[in-house]
Image: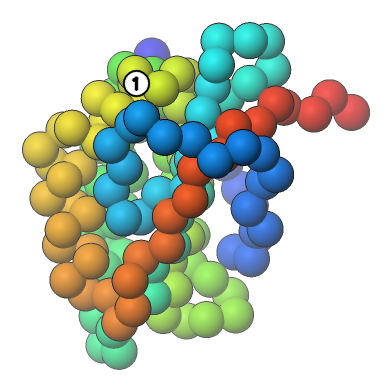
Amino acid sequence: MACPREVHLSARTEPPRGRLLTGLRYPPYALALVHTGKAGRVIIVLGSVVVSEGRMPEALALSKEHVARSRAEVGCISHAVHHDSENPNRLVFVEEWQDPSALNAHFQVPASRAFAKALAAMASEPPQMALYEATQVKR
């Protein structure tokens, strides 16, 4: 299933509450909520990177290519990159995945690994990542 839509969140989103997860291989740009197969649960990957001065155009172009490529992957529900409105050198990534195996497969794609390595090389500080499990809240 390719990504049918884009998620629009503010640049300063607080991490969701949940339980720290282990067992998947994560690149240094992701914060993930891992789906357990129960109704209302999704994998949400939130990541951020502060890009070195003068590298934002290159980092943003590389990130947009990664997002477009990732949207075509099996299990991707949505994938987006956002420019932080409070820090002009910060990019925020928001992804939704169907299940842990789809996310793990995404992290194993050579282009995803190359992207993470290239983006980390442009960073002025280590990219941020944390992993959580959460249930979608119905309103």
Point 64% across, 66% down: residue: 12
Q: Quadrant of residue 23?
A: top left
Q: Please, is residue 48 above or below residue 52 in the view?
A: above
Point 33% across, 31% down: residue: 24
- Judged left or right of residue 101, residue 121 is left
Residue closest to the far top = 38
Residue 98: image x %, image y %?
A: 47, 19
Residue 8: image x %, image y %?
A: 61, 48
Point 30% across, 89% down: residue: 53
Q: Please, is residue 110 above or below residue 46 in the view?
A: above
- Who is closer to the viewer here, 16 or 23? 23
Point 12% across, 50% down: residue: 114
Question: Where is mark 1, residue-wise?
Answer: 102
The answer to whether residue 81 is seen in the rendering is no
Residue 105: image x %, image y %?
A: 25, 25
Amino acid type of the residue that numbered disc 1 sits on in the rendered structure: Ala
Quarter of the figure that contains the C terminus: top right
